[in-house]
Structure formats: structure tokens, C-alpha cells
Amino acid sequence: MPAAVATNLFGLFPGRASASTSGPACSRARVTRGPRAPRAIEQSEVGASSEPFYIKGVPTTSAWELDFCSRPLLDERKKKVWELLICDAERTFEYSEYFPNNKINSATLKQAIDRIVQMEGAVKPDKVRFFRGQMQTIITRALGELDIRAVPSRRCFSIIAWLKDRMDNHYPALPGYDAASPTLFTMDTGVAEDLPDALRGESWAFVQLPLSAVLAELESVERGEVFGSTFPLETAGIEVEEGDDPLVPGVAVFSRRALPLAGWTNGLELSRMRADAERGFLMLETGVSQRWRYSSFPRTPQAREEAAAWSQAVDGSQGLHFLAIQEDPEGEEVAGLWLMRDVEIPKI
């Protein structure tokens, strides 16, 4: 596989910045058109009906994304309405169902998911990702009884983008909408832990690559040739003007044991990396609330400036960034590549 040469962003680690990366045909850069709006619903459907008010397509993929939580909607009893949202990463399948707050339990959720699985042509997923730690018990129990693996993860980029769109454009138009209703959502982040030795590389560098090169390399991830994970840009809300090829910041890790290192790393649900310029280390966030001190760098003015500049580059790329693992800076192949996004989860 031909290597794409990454540039060392700010010179902190000279001679260590030729990470090879390349991304998926399904995620080629394009202008985001926005999701198709669901039809309007009647007041009687909000919180009173167990029937889905909106469904698009039939699920045929092995992985779903799910959210089950209250919404800024009040029913006739002035109680908060809950909603179940499910989609696949490409948003070819979408499902929404409202529930009154006295029906929130694992049995209700199991029945709703089972109805979807029983649809003609539907394929039961192997796993379902969800990002609300507070709902883990209910979601895990419901999925477990259906022999589906529940995966706590903030790699729910498509459903997060869908939820944000609904907050901005859908819920405010519904009867019972109450913008002042308090949210039940809190994102509890754990205390940063030291990275296990099995996940440590020998050196690393801040790097950047054209988006087209990242997407080209990610094709090998989609084919299962290397470890890693990707996601569709358009359904995650990444807006790229047609013809543009922006630079994507990343972190390249080098190790003589790159393959086992990539294999161990692939066991984590990588959501984002952050550079803590003040404390001098990279933070890797995984799962719903896990945080790891991935590596450290000198707390010198130059190092802090580079870390801050890398963080600004992530902000400038709509949160898009990557982690690449390879044997050495001169190598032409990656052992692992993970596309990530630093995105805030809607407070709902």
C-alpha cells in the first residue's frame, strides 16, 4: 500500500512525522445536504402511543446506534416524554418512537427493538452502541435478552448529529415543546488513568494529512486488512465543500510491535484525543467515560505551543482527527488507523 507522507505540524518531534494513512469510498468528501425531515406528528402520538411515528428503511447492518432518553416535550399530564432513536451509521435506517415516562424500563425497550428485528427483511445487529452511561443498565438488559451486544461508546457520531438536528429543527415545532425543561443528561467523565503498558508505543508525533489521503487509507480498514475504525462523514454532520481537500490533524504512534499494539488498541471504543498543553500529556478518551493519559510531552513553551496549535487544528477540522499506528516513520503501511471526532453531545 503506497504511503501518504504526513507533515510534522509544529516541529516538536522532528524526524517522526511520516505516518502512513489513507479513507473509505463511502465517505468521500462532499457537501452535507442534511437529513430528510420526518413527518409532523399529532399531539396524541406524543407520549401516548406505542407505535413508531417515524421509520425509514429496514435495518440490514451489523451495528446500530441507539439513544433512549427524555426529550424537551411534555405530555397531557405535564410529564416529560421519552424517545427511542435508532439508526445505522449511514442513516439508511432510522427509527423513532415516543414513550410516556411511566413506561421506561428494559421490557419496554426490548419489545420495541424486537419489533424492529421482526420486520420483513430486517437483520438483527451484532452490537448496538449507546452514549448515555445513565441508561446502561436498561439498555444492556434489553439487548442482552435479545442476544445483542450492548457497547457503551461515544462513537455514536451519526445519531449524535441526528439528535442535534432534531433539537434545532424538529422538537421546537412539536406540541408540548418546553425549552426550559431540565435535562436528565450528564456526561460523567472518569478520572484519567495511566495507559496500560500493552497500549504504549515507543514514540509518537503530531501529524496532518489531506482528507483524501486519510479516506483512502481507511479503505483498508473497511476491508478488514488493518485494525481500526471509521464512520461516514456526511451522516456525522461533517461539512466539506465539494472539491475541497482540507488537512486533518492526527497522532502517529511508532512501535516495533505495531501489529499487536494496534490489536490491543482496537479493543477500545476510541472517541477522541485531546492535547493538554498545561499538564503536558495526550488524553485518549474511550467508551462512555474512560480517559487515559496516552503519552506525555515536555512542558516547555515550545511544546505547549505545539499542543495548543494541534488542538486548534482539530477545532478547525470540525473535530475530525485520527490515530495511526505503524512500525516506524519511514514505513509504508499502517497497522491501525482510527478516525475520531471531538464533538459535544447535545444536552438533552
Image: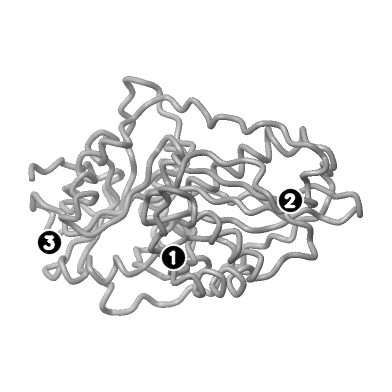
193 or 336, which is in the foreground? 336
Q: Identify the residue position indicated by label 2 in the image.
A: 71
Mark 3: secondary structure: loop
* Image location of residue 6, percent across then percent down: 20, 43
Mark 2: secondary structure: strand
Question: Could you say which disc has been placed on residue 327 in the image?
Answer: 3
Instruction: Please give left or right for residue 324 compared with residue 66 in the image.
Output: left
Instruction: Please give left or right for residue 47 compared with residue 205 in the image.
Output: right
Residue at the spot 13% in from the left edge and 54% down from the top edge:
329
Residue at the spot 44% in from the left edge and 39% down from the top edge:
92
Q: Identify the residue position indicated by label 1 in the image.
A: 286
For label 3, the crowd category at 10 Å Cα-Cα, with few meaning under 14, some 14 to 19 and many 20 or more, is: many
For label 2, the crowd category at 10 Å Cα-Cα, with few meaning under 14, some 14 to 19 and many 20 or more, is: many
Q: Earlier in the sequence, mark 1 or mark 2?
A: 2
Cα separation between marks 2 and 3 = 47 Å
Q: Earlier in the sequence, mark 1 or mark 3?
A: 1
**Residues at circles 2 and 3 in contact by the CB criterion of under 8 Å:** no
Q: Which residue is the extreme one toward the right? A: 77
Cα separation between marks 1 and 3 = 23 Å
**Residues at circles 1 and 2 in contact by the CB criterion of under 8 Å:** no
